[in-house]
Amino acid sequence: MLKLLISRRLPESVMADAARHFDVTCRPVTTPMDHAECVAALRDYDIILPTLGDAFRAAAFAEVTMPRTKLLANFGVGYNHIDVAAARAAGIAVTNTPGAVTDATADIAMTLILMTARRAGEGERMLRTGQWAGWHPTQMLGMHVSGRTVCIIGMGRIGQAIAKRCHFGFGCRIVYANRSPKSVDFPATQMALSAALATADIVVLATPGGAETHHLMGSEAFAAMQRHAIFVNIARGDVVDEAALIAALQGDQIAGAGLDVYEFEPVVPPALIAMENVTLLPHLGTAALDVREDMGRMALANCKAFAEGRALPNPV
């Protein structure tokens, strides 16, 4: 059997399936693999199943001249923790798990939109701390989401799933910015980023992470947004300049934010935690058992295909 390293424990059905097909080692911790662990893994395992934050950077591949590993079967659609070019140069294929995460991530985007627009987190904190004195006509007035203009930044699978929920579920007008021309099968208008930001009541970031999108949302982008608009990020934390976001919120340039990811995750700036107009979730994008099982099965399908000499189902 090929030796498979699973960087963090997956749902039990996935672990059992992996054990039937591979000689499995699973790290006993839930923290990301550091540089030294990645180097050792590349030397010792035929296949590695990494996930968010595992440090498969160029430096790790550079330290291993003849890696035993021939496949990194990433658990997740995002793979900005893997230097794909360096992996390929070392003779290592990289796969991911697209599709399995789309609806769950889009659902979390809607959760953040609604919680932030309707001040749900703030309201729950008020109630739980005994500060609610009862209903009155002007209590905690938020933004009505139905019929608003929503800007989607990044119109891939997840961006489109969010846009469809907003358009068909809430009657929203959809505008979007994408790095290349993109046609979609529902009413939506592609615009330059600055124009799309200036038009929207709600801005949702849904781009991949990586060097090309690092700090895509910075001070200039936040300045382009309307003062009453809210910003939502379900993409990757470092696509946002977190200091610029904090400045925009503190300066009332934008009305609020809903975040599931953070630039220096798991560190969340105290300034964000202190703001009542910010909804903060602990990276829950795909945190549903059946979704994580689907992701695991997809990652294992890539491992099995590699072991059997077949074409990889989901190459990056």
Image (tube, rainbow, N blue to C red):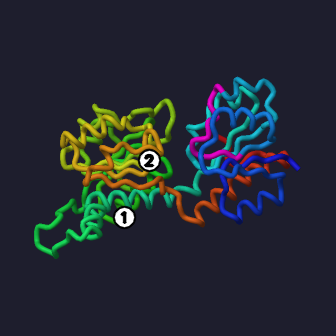
Question: Which residue occupies the foreground of this view, 149 or 121?
Answer: 121
Which numbered circle lies on residue 168? 1
Can residue 181 be seen by looking at this rendering? no
Can residue 150 be seen by looking at this rendering? yes
Q: Amino acid at mark 1?
A: Phe
The structure residue drawn at horizontal position 64% and vertical position 61%, both measured from the top left corner, is 294
Q: Position of residue 296 (x, y in %)?
A: 67, 57
- On the rendered image, what quadrant is the C terminus found in? top right
**Magenta region includes residue 22:** no
Question: Which residue occupies the foreground of this view, 57 or 308?
Answer: 57
Q: Position of residue 278 (x, y in %)?
A: 30, 52
- Would residue 141 appear left or right of 159 to someone viewing this image? left
Q: Which residue is mark 2?
A: 261
Q: Residue furthest bottom?
A: 134
Position of residue 59 relative to residue 265, above or below, is: above
Which stretch did the figure color magenta? 49-59
**Magenta region includes residue 54:** yes
**Between marks 2 and 1, how big is the CA–CA gap?**
26 Å
Q: Residue furthest left?
A: 137
Does label 2 or label 1 sit earlier along the sequence? 1
Rate crowding at label 1 as few (under 14), some (14 to 19) or many (20 or more) other CA atoms within 10 Å: few
